[in-house]
Image: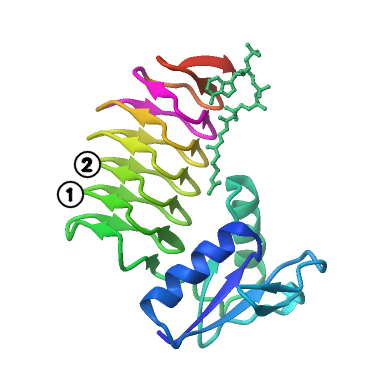
């Protein structure tokens, strides 16, 4: 692959762009963003005509850290354009991904992240820098595993959940959909859909 179309031009888009360039140093990136104040990203001009985004020859990745926004962009594009091709997955060359793990399309595995044996990662997921997804975990679509977060074996994470910076989840825990796990939290028990959890041990502060 020598070209990538990136939807998004903020901080996370820089990480995505550099992951691609680490793998394909001579690769070409086309950035798109709805925000017309975003002029450039990684010193590359940003296009704003997202209504006519094209990726016929390229692959496309949605590089937006917010899970709800990322999902809404995917839905918008999916409903309108039939020649968009999402990237199978984007793997930083310094990530370790087990040969028996499964990755959905549009998913980023960032530098120093580890995805271990028979983990199943959904679509448009972010496994961010130096995070660890242990063996047999199941991560649904639009999840963001934040930098340095650690998921022990057999953890399940529901659609759209954000696991904050450096959070830890012990083995076998099931986290619901659209939850927020605070930075540094240690999750010991199952978490219902939509909950925000903080602290050590993790306590639900809102549902
Ligand atoms: C590449 C990147 O940058 S990826 C982004 C990485 N960023 C992160 O991981 C940040 C994760 N976000 C957090 O941890 C946030 O604090 C959240 C989402 C959990 C809570 O945010 P808010 O809803 O705004 O809650 P708010 O700040 O009002 O705090 C509510 C209470 O929880 C406490 N609290 C908030 N976050 C935490 C935390 N991470 N650990 C412990 N306590 C916390 C607050 O002290 C406050 O307690 P109080 O009511 O006794 O004063």
Give yes or no for contact between labels 1 and 2 (Cβ–Cβ under 8 Å).
yes
Give the vertical position of 133 relative to 205 (above or below).
Answer: below
First in sequence, mark 1 or 2: give its number. Answer: 1
What secondary structure prevails in the magenta region? loop
Q: Residue furthest front?
A: 43
Mark 2 sits near ligand 1, with its Cβ under 8 Å away: no
User: Which circle marks residue 136 in the picture?
Assistant: 2
Q: Quadrant of residue 99?
A: bottom left
3 left or right, relative to 49: left
Of 111 and 116, nearer the camera is 111
Q: How is the image coloured?
A: rainbow
Q: Residue at x 67, y 70 (%)?
A: 80
Q: Position of residue 75 (x, y in %)?
A: 62, 58
Residues rendered magenta in the picture: 172-189
- Please identify the quadrant where the C terminus is shown: top right
Q: Position of residue 119 (x, y in %)?
A: 25, 47
124 left or right, relative to 170: right
User: Which circle marks residue 180 in the picture?
Assistant: none
Q: Quadrant of residue 168?
A: top left
What is the count of numbered marks? 2
Q: Position of residue 184 (x, y in %)?
A: 45, 28
- Please identify the quadrant where the N terminus is shown: bottom left
Residue 84 shown in magenta: no
Query: In 3D space, how far apart are the residues under numbered discs 1 and 2 (Cα atoms)?
Result: 6 Å
SS class, disc 1? loop
Q: Position of residue 128 (x, y in %)?
A: 43, 51
Residue 181 shown in magenta: yes
SS class, disc 2? loop
Q: Residue at x 59, y 60 (%)?
A: 74
Q: Which residue is mark 1?
A: 117
Give the vertical position of 102 relative to 159 (above or below).
Answer: below
């Amino acid at each position: 692959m020598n070209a990538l179309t990136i939807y998004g031009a903020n901080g996370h888009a820089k990480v995505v762009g550099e992951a691609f360039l680490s793998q394909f140093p001579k690769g070409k990136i086309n950035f798109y963003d709805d925000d017309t104040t975003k002029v450039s990203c990684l010193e590359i001009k940003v296009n704003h005509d997202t209504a006519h985004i094209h990726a016929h020859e390229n692959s496309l990745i949605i590089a937006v850290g917010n899970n709800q926004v990322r999902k809404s962009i995917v839905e918008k594009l999916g409903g309108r354009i039939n020649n968009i091709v999402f990237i199978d997955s984007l793997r930083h060359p310094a990530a370790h991904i087990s040969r028996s793990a499964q990755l959905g399309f549009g998913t980023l595995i960032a530098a120093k992240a580890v995805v271990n044996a028979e983990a199943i990662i959904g679509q448009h997921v972010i496994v961010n820098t130096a995070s660890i997804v242990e063996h047999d975990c199941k991560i649904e679509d639009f999840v963001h595993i934040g930098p340095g977060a650690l998921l022990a074996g057999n953890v399940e994470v529901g659609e759209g959940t954000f696991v904050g910076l450096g959070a830890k989840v012990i083995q076998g825990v099931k986290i619901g959909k659209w939850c927020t796990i605070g930075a540094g939290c240690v999750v010991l028990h199952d978490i219902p859909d939509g909950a925000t959890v903080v602290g050590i041990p993790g306590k639900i502060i809102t549902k």
